[in-house]
Image (spheres, grey):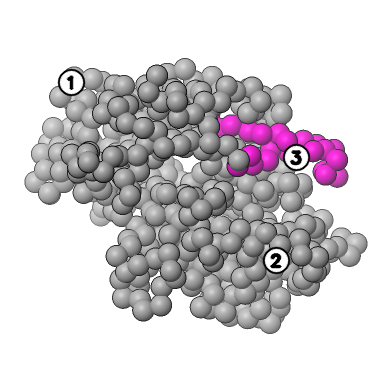
Amino acid sequence: MDKSARIVIVGAGVSGLTSALHLSRRGYKDIHIFDKQEYDRNGYAVSQGCDAASADENKILRASYGKEELYQDMAFGAMEEWDKWNHEIRNADDLPATLSKEDKLWENCGFLRIGNKCDEFEEETQKHFPEHIKHTQYRITDPQRVKDALVHGIPAAKIDPFRRAERRLETDGILDTTAGFLLASKACAYALHLCVKAGVHAHLGPKVGELTSLIKSEDTVTGIRTADGLTHHADLVIIAAGGWTPSLVPQADRLLETTAGSIVLVKLPEDRRDLWDKYSPEKFPVWSWKIQNYGPAGTGTSTGGLYSFPRTADGLIKFGFRGVKYTNYAWPPTRDPEGRLISYPKTDLDVVPQRALEACRAFCRENMPDLLELDMQRGRLCWYTDSVDNSFLIDYVPGAKGLMVASGGSGHGFKFLPVLGEHVVDVVERRQTAYTKKFAWRDVPEGKKNGLEEGPEGRRTLDKQKLVGRREWKL
């Protein structure tokens, strides 16, 4: 594609931002990114009503991927870029209003992955980690490795933050000191800032940035129409709209499904400095509990499928529940060429499914009881886009010239913000790499399809759940 081609990107979350950034770095001069949310004004802040999965308090940054060495390598590459972004921010003179030089987008506080035992995924991760950094992995049931961690200056609280060993509760797992968390909303605000500095045209807001339709000429997409009534010509349109992607590109519906993770936020009181200290990134890791073996979708009954973070700078502790990936088949068949219902984000809720809240409360009862004494600030649903195999879908759309999709983050895509766009541009330019082959349009597998086979009749749909909120936290 000629470097002067006009490229329109729909969606200013992770996939859209990384695509725009790397297109500009590859020399493309006429890039336009559209989004219905005013990210240039609100800094992607959830407190300002931003409702995309990319707009979040924090996300996990880790390279633990079992046998998936392509993802492992990409994650380590992303860590290097996040380090550079931290350095750039410390030394910047022109940051957007929502960022300061004191902000660290990436905090290397460690990631404790625990359960009753080390599962097969963790065993494969340890086997495939590069030999020269295996010393960064500490098996918490190995007395020698626990001693090593203390000698290396790792706080004991990061090895056993819930005192499960002291209480003789069955626990096994790995403290991965290469990992940690990202400040998601601030990271997106910085990436948007970099895009605009590079010459990307940002059309943001409920009129100028909201897609109403694709413009087509026979089998070719030639642009988009926005809610202000304007048409925008494009030589290429890239749909990178997160959870809205399957409804915008129905051809992708068989490979993508919009699913909700459940988020619970607990606020630390200002006068409880003991808790601020206890849950600080310096003393407390990112952690997950039975994240791989909670049970089949919709049938798990034990506490699991959980992850959480150290407190934020303003005293929030965020819990995430992915033990059940909820769906909302609400996109009407009248809007789909084949008359199908499609799972669609429902972002106007401050409640979560009862099972999600109960999983958080059950874990806290056993391991973090001091948080059950506090107020739950709010709950919400975070709408990801799962692919049939948890890999990205980045490719031209079959049967629609001039149209691409960049989606399928499957709840683990945020960490790749600084590097994923390199592979998007490779697809734009039809380069063949191991990554473009992995992310390509593909056949739907036989049998289980990461839950997509359940469809609107499945047990995970929101209309089959009891939704609960703040009042139930202390009950």
Residue 412 in magenta? no
Left or right of 459 on screen, residue 382: left
User: Which residue does the numbered mark 1 point to in the structure image?
Assistant: 167
Residues shaded magenta: 323-347
Residue 340 in magenta? yes
Looking at this view, name the residue that lies furthest to the front: 271
Question: Which label lies toward us, 3 or 2?
Answer: 2
Query: Which residue: 51% across, 53% down?
Result: 48
Question: Which label lies toward us, 1 or 2?
Answer: 2
Among numbered discs 1 and 2, the one appearing first in the sequence: 1
User: Which residue does the numbered mark 3 point to in the structure image?
Assistant: 331
Whether 325 is drawn above or below 47: the answer is above
Query: Which residue: 54% across, 66% down?
Result: 40
User: Which residue does the numbered mark 2 point to in the structure image?
Assistant: 208
Residue 401, located in which quarter of the rendered image? bottom right
Query: Which residue: 19% across, 42% down?
Result: 273
The span from disc 1 to disc 3 (Cα, nearest Å) is 49 Å
Query: Which residue: 18% across, 19% down?
Result: 168
Looking at this view, name the residue that lies furthest to the right: 218
The span from disc 1 to disc 2 (Cα, nearest Å) is 58 Å
Question: Disc 1, disc 3: CB below 8 Å?
Answer: no
